[in-house]
Amino acid sequence: MSSTELPKHYELFIGGREVPSSKGEKTTLLNPANRAVLATAAVGGAEEARYAVEEAERAFRSGWAEADGAHRARVLFRLGQLLSERAEEFSRLETLNQGKPLRESKTDVLFAARTLEYMAGLADKVQGDSIPVPGERMDYTVREPIGVTVHIAPWNYPLQLSVRSLAPALAAGNTAVLKPATLTPLTALAFARLAKEAGLPDGVLNVLVGPGREVGETLVEDPRVASVSFTGSLEVGKRIMELASRHVRPVTLELGGKSPNIVFADADLDRAARGVLYGIFLNAGQMCWAGSRLIVQRSVQEAFLGKLSELARKLKIGPGWEPGVEMGPLVSEDQMQRVLGYVEKGQSEGARLVTGGHRAGAPGLEKGNFVEPTIFADARPDMAISREEIFGPVLTSLAFDTFEEAMALANDSTYGLFSGVWTKDLSTAHRAARHIQAGMVSVNEYPVTFPQTPFGGYKQSGIGWEQGIHALDFYTRTKNVNVFFGAPRKK
């Protein structure tokens, strides 16, 4: 699918049908690789937000919640199969709208499909427990769907992170309103149409494009909404938590990260260099779980940085649809300028620029939002590039001598999402995993996750968990039932 084959305009998707903006507003979507116009998309407001919740509530009351779990499983599994069958189409759409290389987009699409299949397998296994209590009683619990769920997705993984929270919500019997990022709504809108084709009843999934201040806040504050799932920045996450607290509404927040990748001197340095490279330059560094802090043992620092910078300089940068491209553009010009601002700040604070540090200006890249793979060394923990989430292809390197110093550097962050450890020593690996303050630790590969493994963070990286069997817990509530069957008490 080329940009010329895309529809020129996309409407909202509410109640199983395309819905125009009541105000006639639309946003122009640009290809990040060349800033050419891809299409326009309708932009909703508070009126559409309330309508989407109304349709979701109607669908919840109309039987989706009470449907046999096996029926929900079949629909979700079919949806996963359809997504797999059309992976090429969805990957192309993701790359054109978001910018990442096609191979990355396809990985994301297939991960989303696998997530649907995994959660489909759990849809008829939402069950309670019997509890031993004294006397002639039976006591048990049941788990029920909570109702209308809101999902606010980011622009860095538009489809994958939408499906990550949608799949368990729908598997448990809830209905959903999805608000994708205004920059990258195309795969979410296409997914809603695919869900209808798979047999999802009208109103069970609604997709609404619109600004966070109006649409997002209207959804979060609607009294009919039962829960909110958000992936994005720390600042917006705090705002959502504040609004939801007014209604005592549960939230799952997956927020920022400044994840450490710790390389010990005994590691396989060639393998570690490839892993560290992948962990920061995947998706042009636009990842909450990016390994943006390299913490390397001082005795191998220069050798390791030499290997790493050589690999970085060899990365093929270009439009995501071109063969062999390993790193695409940043999602927008604003994001590119933000990243370049951090590069300037790192140099002014005294960090040593090892490689990169500029806007990529090779022939054919001039019109796009491309930034060179950038590596800083000799950084201090108090520098902005060591503490703040840059969300771009910028790696900050800090050195350590002892295990204890490595752990102190790794944990010196307000975030605690992901982490990596590179060592051949099993004891070192397990000790590090115990001491690192992060929701996930990966040893000798980075980054990695699966639909069946929990994804969530410590500290200001968020609240709650996505993925895995326990993701269903957030989308159900427990009811306790006590039945007394003994003889009536004598007066």
Image: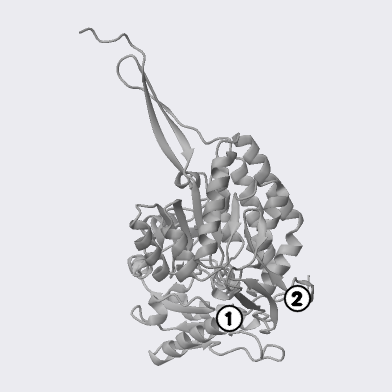
Q: Secondary structure at mark 1?
A: loop
The quadrant in which the C terminus is found is: top left
Q: Quadrant of residue 350?
A: bottom left
The residue drawn where x is 53% and y is 45% is 174
Query: Which residue is painted at 42% across and 81% down in the image?
Result: 385
Q: CA distance from mark 1 to mark 2?
A: 17 Å
The extreme front residue here reads: 22
Q: Quadrant of residue 110?
A: bottom right
Dot 2: element: helix
Locate residue 142 relative to residue 486 in the image: left or right.
Answer: right
Answer few, some or many: residues within 10 Å of disc 1's Cα (few below 14, many 20 plus, some between 14 and 19).
Answer: many
Residue 53 is situated, as x and y percent measured from the top left of the image, at 52, 54
Q: Quadrant of residue 63?
A: top right
Looking at the picture, tell me which residue is in the foreground, 327 or 193: 193
- Vertical order, 487 against 464 (above or below): above
On screen, residue 439 above or below 352: above
What's under tag 2, amino acid-wise? Answer: Ser
**Residue 269: horizontal and vertical position, in percent?**
54, 70
Which numbered disc, 1 or 2, marks the residue that appears first in the sequence? 2
Report the disc number at residue 332. 1
Q: What residue is shown with label 2?
A: 3
